[in-house]
Amino acid sequence: MSARIRLKKFGTKKRPYYRIVVMDNRAPRDGKTIDELGYYHPIEAEGKQIAFNAEKVKTWLANGATASDTVKKILNKEHISL
């Protein structure tokens, strides 16, 4: 099983929000998660858009999980090096 850090979509039409989660690479986008790391609200105010547990992210990356392109951009915005 290869773990991947990616976004899981919630919300309604034109009002999305996402959770940053660890999932099996083969699982569907809204499937069962292994661990939840934080959230991303793209339509909130600039300071409230992103919140996550940096220690959990670093632990998963050290254990071999890979981040999706979108999650890499979000983490780089928050100064977490990959």
Image (cartoon, grey):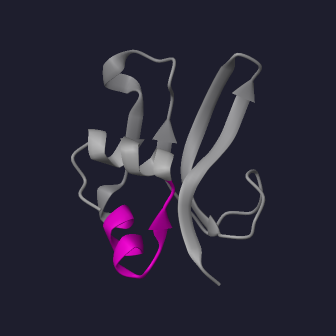
Question: In the displayed image of the protein, which residue is found farthest to the front?
Answer: 69
**Is 3 left or right of 16, judged from the image as shown?**
left
Q: Residue at x 49, y 36 (%)?
A: 40
| Residue 51, placed above or below residue 64 | above
Nearest the viewer among 13 and 52 is 13
| Count of numbered circles on the image | 0
Q: Residue at x 65, y 84 (%)?
A: 1
| Residue 76, placed above or below residue 40 | below
Horizontal and vertical percent for residue 14? 70, 16
Horizontal and vertical percent for residue 41? 51, 28
Horizontal and vertical percent for residue 46? 34, 19
Q: Residue at x 56, y 54 (%)?
A: 6
| Residue 61, magenta (yes or no) | yes
| Residue 6, magenta (yes or no) | no
**Is 27 left or right of 37, judged from the image as shown?**
right
Quadrant showing the C terminus: bottom left
Q: Residue at x 36, y 54 (%)?
A: 53
Nearest the viewer among 33 and 25 is 25
Nearest the viewer among 26 and 34 is 26
Quarter-of-image position of residue 27: bottom right
Nearest the viewer among 4 and 53 is 4
Horizontal and vertical percent for residue 81? 23, 58
State which region is magenta: 56-68
| Residue 48, placed above or below residue 28 | above
Quarter-of-image position of residue 26: bottom right
**Is 55 left or right of 60, judged from the image as shown?**
left
